[in-house]
Amino acid sequence: MIRIALTGGIGCGKTTVCDFFSQHNVPVIDTDIIAHELVKPGKTALFEISDYFGSDILFNDGSLNRKALASKVFNSDKNRLHLEYILHPKIKQALQLKLNQLTSCYVIIAIPLLIETNQQADYDRVLVIDCEEQQQINRTIARDQRSLSEVKAIMKSQVSRQQRIAVANDVIDNTQNINTLQSQVDLLHKKYMKLCKP
């Protein structure tokens, strides 16, 4: 089974591309969803995070206040690295369990911070979703209701477009319309299916 790591900056369209691959009955594993599961109330990771960052990153019901945590992480390398230290081994373990259950020709694994966390060598191919920086900003503000300064801080914490493209085996250009995006996914699906065949 070919393991394809899908990545891209915030607002590049990773979720939409994953949905298009799913329409081809390709298994898609989103490490963000795994991370969300790991920080639910009662989970070990949430105890470790609140122990380190303080109880003010929790809502009154004990669930994680992502914005409060983000504000502590985006402006501090030390905090970001500690969060990764808590979460990444647990994400990898949960991911491997999911991979062990698959028998498909190939699998898409969405990893937003693939290059930032230097994981690209763990996968057979890297697929980068790319778009203009201004498009990233506009899409993220529209989707997440974040401020311009928040979006720029997130983008600054991520690697540049050039750095992502430099390690890519395949690049999807998401600067055009949704139909162009889907046709690129369709072509890549055919390519990956051919790569699977002995």
Image (cartoon, rainbow, N blue to C red):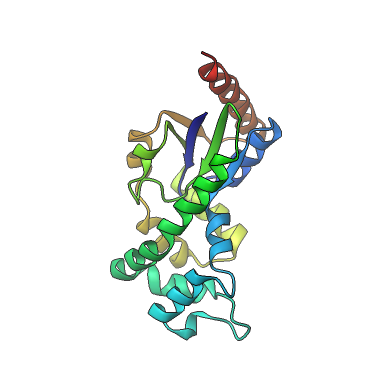
**Residue 1 visible from this viewpoint:** yes
In front of the other: 158 or 36: 36
Q: Outermost residue toward the left?
A: 78
Q: At 35% across and 51% down in the image, what residue appears?
A: 117
123 up-or-down from 43: above or below: above
Residue 60 location (% of width, % of height): 60, 86
Q: At 50% across and 73% down in the image, what residue appears?
A: 46
In front of the other: 104 or 126: 104
197 up-or-down from 93: above or below: above
Residue 143 location (% of width, % of height): 61, 58
Quadrant in which residue 185 is drawn: top right
Residue 2 location (% of width, % of height): 50, 29
Quadrant in which residue 39 is drawn: bottom right
Is 65 placed left or right of 78 in the picture?
right
Residue 90 location (% of width, % of height): 46, 58
Count of numbered circles on the image: 0
Q: At 56% across and 25% down in the image, what residue appears?
A: 188
Q: At 54% across and 66% down in the image, what residue appears?
A: 146
**Residue 135 visible from this viewpoint:** no
10 up-or-down from 126: above or below: below
